[in-house]
Image: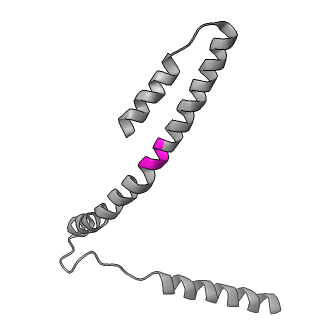
Amino acid sequence: MKKYKKTALVLTFALMVAFAFSTTAYAAPTGDVAGAIEGTWRDASGQIKTVVNNVVFPAIDLILAVFFFAKLGMAYFDYRKHGQFEWAAPAILFACLVFTL
């Protein structure tokens, strides 16, 4: 009997939580879902552009700069070991870095 009460209590609590979090959300009084999505995108586009410009691009620039200098160092050590400097990888990373800046 105790197990039945505990199961019923847990089930009742889960059902109440489900009812509490399952409210109906309407797009607009006319039911214009596309307009609601466009409005939300319009409002969020400025914030998205700010985050991309202030966070994403500097992070990409930092990663490319680190890879560029690491590859340049590795190319130098390969030059000292083999007497031949390989320009392809550092040049590609430098071009990507210039492109993102």
Looking at the image, which residue sits at the far right?
A: 2
- Asked if 66 appears above or below 7 in the picture, the reply is above
Residue 98: in sight, yes or no?
A: yes
46 is within the stretch colored magenta:
no
> x and y percent of residue 71 in the render?
58, 26
How many numbered discs? 0
| Residue at image location 39% in from the left, 54% down from the top | 52
> In screen coordinates, is 39 left or right of 99?
left
Give above or below for 65 relative to 93: below
Rendering quarter of residue 43:
bottom left
Q: Residue at x 20, y 71 (%)?
A: 32
Report the predominant secondary structure element of the magenta stretch. Answer: helix
Residue lying at 44% horizontally and 51% vertically, measured from the top left: 56
Residue 58: x percent and y percent? 45, 48
Q: Nearer the viewer, residue 72 or 63?
A: 72
Q: Residue furthest left?
A: 30
Quadrant where the image shows the N terminus: bottom right
The part of the image, by quadrant, that contains residue 2 is bottom right
Residue 1 in view here: no
Image quadrant where one finds the C terminus: top left
Over which residues does the magenta segment extend? 57-61
Q: Nearer the viewer, residue 44 or 49?
A: 49
The residue lying toward the viewer, choosing from 35 and 42, is 42
Residue drawn at (65%, 15%) of the image: 78
